[in-house]
Image (tube, rainbow, N blue to C red):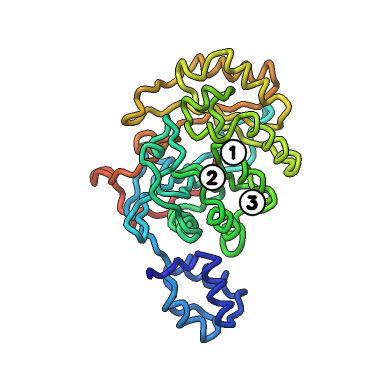
Amino acid sequence: MANRSVFDGGAIRSEFDKAGINTHCIPLIWKHVLQNSELDEIPSLPSAAYSLLRSNFKSSTSTLHSVLQSDDNVTTKLLIRLQNGTFVEAVIMRYDTRLGRYGGKPRPGGLRSTLCISSQVGCKMGCKFCATGSMGFKNNLSSGEIVEQLVHASRLSDIRNVVFMGMGEPLNNYAAMVEAVRIMTGSPFHLSPKRITVSTVGIIHAINKLQDDLPNVNLAVSLHAPVQDIRCQIMPAARAFPLERLMDSLRIYQKKSQQKIFIEYIMLDGVNDEEQHAHQLGKLLETFQVVVNLIPFNPIGSLSNFRTSNEHIVTRFQQILRGVYNIRTTVRKQMGQDISGACGQLVVNLPDKRSVVSAGLLTDIEDLHV
């Protein structure tokens, strides 16, 4: 059997417990690997830990196959090869928060980076506007393979935020996702739970336990339509998660968490972007504390049968939600389209060598954010 990732928290804790080794030293191992990339010469470990690590674990079970940089240098896509030979993609997005305004005043902050992370190879959900869905489902990632995406990205940029909005449905790989988030919020990563967002198409039974397992982590729901029949047309998995039941679960989630819920809504010309849809969405959400994120559709490959909504239509949609229903609504800035790193575009195709930046040559990407 192949060795496990040293970042598979449950596996390494189990092996240390069986060997009678204090698990408090595990964060020290992770810190050493993060800084040195190897399991050798880790200081201050019990002697029994060294042989156990060498025989059962690898410092990384994945490799950074290639790095693609967008023309504007604000988006970087990482193609990561897993131990079983499959690939996933992760995307670093860089933002200067001082360029926006909040409450009419310049926003505080500065240059920050957000990592969009994958939880599965492919996806079972089959959303018709999403490139990953066209791959079908290959396999779940282990918690270590999820965390290793952050490890690879951290060597290129100082990551401040993590969003589970890459390949896969995170709540369909629930246990590994929860363990990965717990590792990311602990030593040595120390990410704030409030800067981690888990996105889902609406897996109701998992939403019902998410707040207890990951308090303070943000929830984003890929709603994409205000009524059940349109959702089922563009998101086949929605048949298993009726909109009425989904909204009931979100109501309970919000009451327990006392946190805003992020609503993702992809704008598809003539499908879900009419004024009546904006009013239906407003009425559906008016009793919730939400932020609606309108996402311009990114045409790619076989998905070209959908069209991007006109900018005027998107603006009018936003005005209705804001003006009539007082719902905070943003329009997602498009990033990384030239490297197929924008929302809905993640699907593994080995890149043209001409567009690849060698992983070993890319250094000192500045800290930027969402």
Q: Secondary structure at mark 2?
A: strand
In the image, is 318 to the left or to the right of 157?
right
Where is residue 68? Give x, y as percent: 34, 45
Q: Secondary structure at mark 3?
A: helix
Where is residue 356? Give x, y as percent: 29, 47
Image point (54%, 65%), residue name: 9
Pointer 2: what residue? 163
Image point (35%, 55%), residue name: 81
Quadrant assignment, res 54: bottom left
Label 1 is placed on what type of residue? Answer: Ala
Pointer 1: what residue? 220
**Residue contact between numbered discs 1 and 2, judged by CB atoms under 8 Å:** yes
Rendered position, 109 above or below 231? below
Image point (65%, 36%), residue name: 261
Where is residue 168? Give x, y as percent: 46, 44
The quarter in which the C terminus is drawn is top right
Rendered position, 35 above or below 309? below
Pointer 3: what residue? 193
Foreground label between 1 and 2 = 1
Quadrant assignment, res 186: bottom right
- As drawn, the residue found furthest toward the front would be 240
In the image, is 84 to the left or to the right of 291?
left
Residue 140 or 180: which is nearer the viewer?
A: 140
Foreground label between 3 and 1 = 1
**Residue contact between numbered discs 3 and 1, judged by CB atoms under 8 Å:** no
Label 2 is placed on what type of residue? Answer: Val
CA gap between label 1 and label 2 equals 9 Å
Badge 3 or badge 2: first in the primary sequence: 2
In the image, is 15 to the left or to the right of 69?
right
Where is residue 71? Give x, y as percent: 35, 37
